[in-house]
């Protein structure tokens, strides 16, 4: 009885905690900053505006003056499940995506030629999905959303003309909202389990910038893991008398649910080579620790506490990007680029909480220098998240779910403004 009760209450939470927020493999590179135009190629080495305070704090020492940048990006998420097979009935969930706005603020203050201070705000991890109440995979997920926002103060030190170091501290706020259907013991409508909670945790980032020549820059950054813990009383709605009696007998009604997940640590190396006064070539290679994100903890605290660690067998992911910039006229700078991220899972471990495969990014953007102090820009990026095939075997409560995504993409639109003091 105790095992059955635990399974009924925790069935959705085990998956919801592990793949929260469209999360597996989606690292939000899209911050509205000018490097969206290169699909973020060269991000850790560009150091050409105040956004380097977030992406590589060592680059702050390269800026010639104090500088402010504000950026706004809108993400239009489209995710439509198709070709489904389910023994639980229900529809395809329609378009589970939506529109997400993100605002970024970056400021660098030059203390002297060696030391600069900076602060950045924005989001680098999150998004969400909403399939509705009656779709075929409702016992896996109905809604999943994780919104994060980070404040990152930092400092950089320029050792000499070739070498700079940087360090920052990240204060990360996360808000989790999860809903999953539960099958009642009696025939009829489903019940629902939901968890809505927030948490604030700390992390850090490190950066190195090397300038071997005037035309070549190399950057290396590290962003630490952030351990989030969401604590809440699980809300149960439309629970039938049979399931309610079982929960009451086990002392699980009103239990507190603790969900633990880790925002992955990440490493990125970048290079920028200025071929001429007009052309520059940019590149990235990166690694993200998604295998740690797949190892989640779930604790149910009632009369007694039950804890479970589940490994969803995620793979670490690799990121590659290549881009270019072309100054075709003195005030105008055109950027374009392409990036590729490997998949953190395969069809047997992928679930509709995280319908992601390999990711391909294609970006382009334009920057215009209004005068020596002010620059404005705009960028667009298309993200193809792959077919995301899944093949989930039948289980007593969740059922079989097989299919892929006819549409699985994100459109990102950005505008930004930079001002030098």
Image: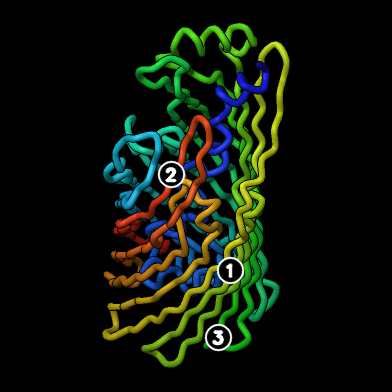
Q: Alpha-carbon neighbours of circle 3 within 10 Å: few (<14), some, or many (≥20)?
A: some
Q: Is residue 335 above or below residue 248?
A: below
Residues at marks 2 and 3, CA–CA distance in whole angstroms:
51 Å
* Viewer-proximal residue among 326 and 166: 326
Quadrant of the drawing holding the N terminus: top right
Q: Position of residue 413 (x, y in %)?
A: 29, 58
Q: Alpha-carbon neighbours of circle 1 within 10 Å: few (<14), some, or many (≥20)?
A: some
Secondary structure of residue under mark 2? strand
Q: Alpha-carbon neighbours of circle 2 within 10 Å: few (<14), some, or many (≥20)?
A: many
- Residue that label 2 marks: 401
In which quarter of the view is residue 414 placed? bottom left
Residue at 43%, 27% in the rendered image:
181
Residues at circles 1 and 2 in contact by the CB criterion of under 8 Å:
no
Q: Position of residue 130 (x, y in %)?
A: 35, 38
Q: Nearer the viewer, mark 1 or mark 2?
A: 2
Q: Which mark is residue 129?
A: none
First of labels 1, 3 by sequence position: 3
Image side of residue 164 versus residue 404, left or right: right
Residue at 61%, 81% in the rendered image:
211
Secondary structure of residue under mark 1? strand
- Residue that label 3 marks: 216
- Residue that label 1 marks: 286
In which quarter of the view is residue 232 placed? top right
Q: Is residue 224 above or below residue 86?
A: below
Image side of residue 68 versus residue 271, left or right: left
Quadrant of the drawing holding the C terminus: bottom left
First of labels 1, 2 by sequence position: 1
């Amino acid at each position: 009885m105790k095992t059955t009760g635990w399974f009924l209450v925790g069935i959705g939470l085990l998956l919801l905690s592990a793949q929260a927020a469209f999360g597996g493999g989606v690292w939000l590179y899209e911050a509205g900053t000018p490097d969206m135009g290169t699909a973020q190629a060269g991000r850790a080495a560009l150091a050409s505006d105040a956004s380097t305070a977030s992406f590589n704090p060592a680059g702050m020492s390269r800026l010639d003056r104090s500088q402010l940048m504000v950026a706004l990006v809108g993400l239009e998420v489209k995710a439509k499940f198709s070709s489904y097979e389910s023994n639980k009935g229900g529809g395809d969930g329609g378009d589970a995506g939506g529109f997400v706005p993100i605002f970024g603020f970056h400021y660098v203050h030059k203390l002297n030629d060696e030391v600069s201070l900076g602060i950045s705000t924005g989001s680098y991890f999150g998004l969400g999905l909403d399939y509705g109440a009656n779709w075929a995979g409702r016992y896996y997920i109905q809604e999943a959303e994780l919104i994060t926002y980070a404040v990152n103060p930092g400092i950089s030190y320029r050792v000499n003309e070739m070498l700079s170091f940087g360090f920052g501290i990240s204060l990360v706020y996360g808000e989790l909202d999860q809903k999953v259907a539960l099958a009642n013991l009696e025939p009829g409508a489903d019940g629902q389990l939901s968890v809505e909670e927030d948490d604030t945790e700390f992390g850090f980032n490190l950066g190195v910038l090397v300038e071997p020549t005037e035309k070549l820059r190399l950057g290396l950054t590290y962003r630490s893991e952030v351990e989030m813990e969401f604590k809440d009383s699980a809300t149960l709605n439309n629970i039938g008398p049979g399931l309610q009696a079982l929960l009451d007998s086990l002392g699980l009604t009103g239990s507190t649910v603790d969900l633990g997940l880790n925002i992955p640590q990440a490493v990125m190396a970048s290079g920028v080579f200025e071929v001429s006064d007009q052309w520059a070539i940019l590149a990235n290679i990166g690694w993200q620790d998604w295998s740690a994100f797949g190892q989640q903890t779930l604790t149910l605290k009632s009369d007694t506490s039950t804890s479970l660690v589940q490994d969803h067998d995620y793979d670490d992911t690799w990121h590659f990007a290549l881009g270019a910039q072309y100054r075709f006229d003195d005030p105008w700078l055109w950027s374009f680029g392409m990036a590729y991220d490997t998949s953190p899972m395969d069809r047997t471990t992928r679930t509709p909480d995280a319908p992601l495969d390999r990711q391909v990014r294609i970006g382009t953007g334009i920057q215009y220098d209004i005068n020596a102090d002010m620059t404005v820009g705009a960028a667009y990026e298309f993200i193809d998240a792959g077919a995301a095939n899944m093949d989930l075997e039948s289980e007593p409560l969740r059922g079989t779910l097989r299919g892929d995504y006819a549409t699985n993409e994100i459109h990102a639109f950005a505008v930004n403004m930079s001002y030098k003091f």
